[in-house]
């Protein structure tokens, strides 16, 4: 018997029986048919068991009885060979089981008249009588379109958004002691010299320790900050004495 049905199926049949999986042409989900046991397989197993019993019986008998047992064993081997490796009887059963499996799962699928695909209920638009690929459900399509527009708007806004306003610059600290790149720590990676800063006594700029002249104004960094009035030792760059207030 010929059947018009989905081309998407997978056969799970074995020598012991028959079973099939049928899939939706749209989403790929599907249904599995009921397992049907092969009658030829049962007959084969029965013949093998009968042959084993006859072989054991023939081993106990001698003379005429032994001849009868050997004859029974040869007959059972013939039956076993006959049904081995998918015999014509098994193939006939397989075709009948495939037809029955299609009829079993046919109510789970519908054929789209526009694209001729067999689809499950999830992919079927009942209102339009077409699959959802040919006639998407209005609510689902509107929601999908709105989300697509939202993603486009977000992407466009992100392209023009200013997310950082800092300056793109790279500064390498040079050790004032050895003249090599010192790294980002408090001490030079090469010689271990301290990498702190000191204030220029003239302009107040922050200058690395160990430099003899200010990089901003050129003043000597060892300029004395001793108060001429009271002799107090002030920090370099101080404009008035911290002890007596005398201008330095």
Image (cartoon, helix red, strand yellow):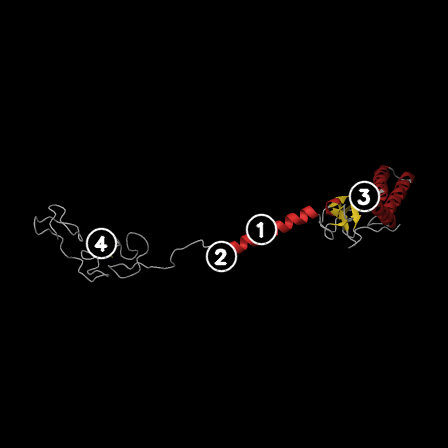
Q: Nearer the viewer, mark 1 or mark 3?
A: 1
Residue furthest left as drawn: 229
What numbered label is drawn on residue 163? none
Give residue 33's position: percent from left, percent from top.
79, 43
Do the residues under discs 1 and 4 have CB atoms within 8 angstroms? no
Left or right placement of residue 117 versus residue 220 in this view: right
Alpha carbon distance from label 4 to label 3:
88 Å
Residue beneath disc 2 = 160
Neighbourhood count class around disc 3 (C-alpha, 10 Å): few under 14, some 14–19, many 20 upward: few
Left or right placement of residue 144 versus residue 17 in this view: left
Left or right placement of residue 82 versus residue 194 in this view: right
Which numbered disc, 2 or 4, marks the residue that appears first in the sequence? 2
What numbered label is drawn on residue 198? 4
Do the residues under discs 1 and 3 have CB atoms within 8 angstroms? no
Reply above or below: 49 against 159.
Answer: above
- Residues 135 and 56: in front is 135
Q: Nearer the viewer, mark 2 or mark 4?
A: 2
Reply above or below: 240 against 181.
Answer: above
Residue beneath disc 1 = 150
Q: Secondary structure at mark 2?
A: helix
Q: Secondary structure at mark 1?
A: helix
Which numbered disc, 4 or 3, marks the residue that appears first in the sequence? 3
């Amino acid at each position: 018997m010929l059947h018009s049905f989905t081309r998407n199926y997978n056969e799970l049949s074995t020598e012991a029986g028959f079973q099939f999986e049928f899939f939706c042409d749209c989403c790929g989900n599907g249904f599995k048919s009921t397992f049907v046991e092969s009658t030829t397989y049962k007959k084969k197993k029965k013949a093998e068991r009968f042959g084993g019993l006859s072989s054991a019986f023939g081993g106990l008998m001698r003379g005429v009885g032994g001849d009868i047992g050997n004859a029974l064993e040869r007959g059972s081997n013939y039956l076993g060979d006959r049904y081995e490796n998918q015999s014509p009887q098994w193939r006939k059963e397989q075709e009948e089981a495939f037809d029955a499996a299609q009829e079993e799962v046919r109510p789970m699928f519908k054929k789209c008249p526009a694209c001729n695909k067999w689809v499950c209920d999830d992919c079927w638009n009942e209102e339009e009588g077409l699959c959802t690929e040919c006639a998407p459900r209005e609510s689902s399509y509107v929601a999908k379109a709105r989300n697509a527009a939202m993603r486009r708007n977000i992407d466009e806004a992100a392209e023009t958004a200013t997310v950082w306003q800092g300056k793109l610059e790279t500064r390498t600290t040079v050790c004032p002691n050895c003249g090599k790149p010192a790294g980002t720590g408090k001490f030079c990676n090469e010689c271990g010299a301290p990498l702190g800063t000191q204030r220029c006594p003239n302009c107040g700029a922050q200058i690395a320790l160990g430099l003899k002249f200010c990089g901003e104004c050129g003043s000597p960094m060892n300029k004395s900050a001793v108060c001429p009035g009271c002799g107090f030792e002030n920090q370099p760059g101080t404009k008035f004495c911290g002890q007596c207030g005398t201008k330095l």
